[in-house]
Image: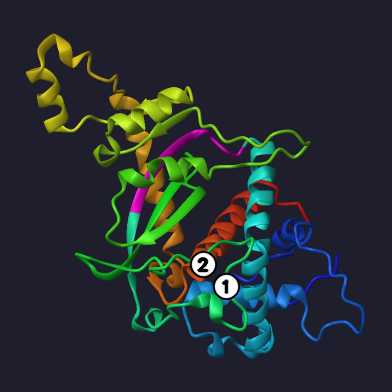
Amino acid sequence: MASVAVTRRFDLTDGQWALLERLLPTSKKPGRPPKWSKRQLIDGIRWRVRVGAPWRDVPDCYGHWRSVYGLYRRWQRDGTWARMLAGLQARADALGLITWDVSVDSTIVRAHQHAAGARRRPDLQVEPPDGPGGTEPGDHALGRSRGGWTTKLHLACEQGRKVLSVVVTGGQRGDSPQFTTVLGRIRVPRVGGGRARTRPDRVLADKAYSSTANRAYLRQRSIRCVIPVKVDQAAHRRARGSRGGRPPAFDQVAYRLRHAVECGISLLKQHRAVATRYDKLAVRYETTVTISTIDTWLRRIDKHLPNTA
C-alpha cells in the first residue's frame, strides 16, 4: 500500500488508512483521476472536526476547501459516514473489542452564533440536506436550556468508552424520553453475515432514566437493568404498601461501571467541532459527531492490530 507523508498531527496513519480504505465507496465516475486523493480530503475533514475551524480555513495540504466540504456533505447525504462507522464497529465486535454492558447518558453542547440562521424550509435548497443519511428536524436540534442556545447529545457507550449510538435533539429535551430511541439505534453488523446485533447484555443509566416505561422496555427485550430508583418513586411505592410491589433490583457494584459513558463523552469532546456546535443543520452536526466517533474506533482497532498495514 502506498504511503503518504504525514503533514500534521493526528493525520491518518498507514494502519488506520488500511482499515478505513476498505470501507470507502467505490468510484464509478469515468475520466481522469481526481486532483486530491480521498486520504487527503478525509484528513482535511478530520482536521476541521478536531479543530473546529471554518471550512474555508482548512489547510491547502488537504486540498481545496470546497472539495473537502463537498465530500463531507456528499457522504452525509448518502449515508456513507454512517456505513463506515458501522463497518468499524463490526470489525471491533469480531475482534472481541466490544463489551456489551452499555451505559446511556446525555450531554449539553453550546451552539456557536454561527450555528443559527438555518433555512426554515431546507427542502427548498438547491441541494436539500435530507437523504439516506438522515432527515433534518424542524427545530434543527437547537433549543433554549439553562446553558443558553444548546444542542443535546444522547449517547449509548460500551464499556470500552466507545460510542455505539447517538441521538441529537434540542438542548431543552428531556433524557428519559430518548432512552428507547438511543438503544433502538444500536446496530452492529456481523462480519461473516447474519443479523446485526442490537441487544446489549446489560444497560446502565442514572436516575434520570428511572421510569416504569423504560424498565418495561428493557424487561420486554430481556436486557438486565442497572438503574437506581428516584427517592420520590421509592416513597410512593412504600406509601402504597403491599400494592406498591417489590422494589426494582439494583446492583450497586455494577453501577460503578457507568463511568464509561462519561469517559466516552470526554473522548468525543476532544474534537472541538463536537464540544461546540458550529453547524447550522442538525444532520451536519450529527455527521460531525459520527466522524469523531469513527476516529475513536479507528484508534482502538489500530492499537489492537498494530500491523494492519
Kindly tell me whether residue 284 is visible in this rendering: yes
**Looking at the image, which residue is at 62% across and 65% down?**
131
**268 in the magenta segment:** no
The span picked out in magenta is: 97-106
**Of residues 26 and 58, which is closer to you in this image?**
26
**Looking at the image, which residue is at 40% across and 46% down?**
261
**Of residues 135 and 155, which is closer to you in this image?**
135
Direction from residue 239 to residue 60 in the image, left or right: right
- The residue carrying pointer 1 sits among few (fewer than 14), some (14 to 19) or many (20 or more) residues within 10 Å by Cα, namely many
In primary-sequence order, the first of circles 1 and 2 is 1
Q: Nearer the viewer, mark 1 or mark 2?
A: 1
Direction from residue 162 to residue 111 in the image, left or right: left
Looking at the magenta stretch, what is its main secondary structure? strand
- The residue carrying pointer 2 sits among few (fewer than 14), some (14 to 19) or many (20 or more) residues within 10 Å by Cα, namely many
**x%, y% of residue 113?**
34, 83
**Real-space CA distance between mark 1 and mark 2, rounded to the nearest whole angstrom:** 7 Å
Write down the quadrant of residue 44 in the picture: bottom right
**Looking at the image, which residue is at 70% across and 48% down?**
305
Which label number is shown at residue 26?
none
Which residue occupies the extreme top position in the image?
242
* Vertical order, 20 against 254 (above or below): below
The reply to whether the C-beta atoms of the residues labelled 1 and 2 are less than 8 Å apart is yes
Q: Quadrant of the C terminus?
A: bottom right
Which label number is shown at residue 129?
1
**Of residues 189 and 101, which is closer to you in this image?**
189
Residue occupied by mark 2: 283
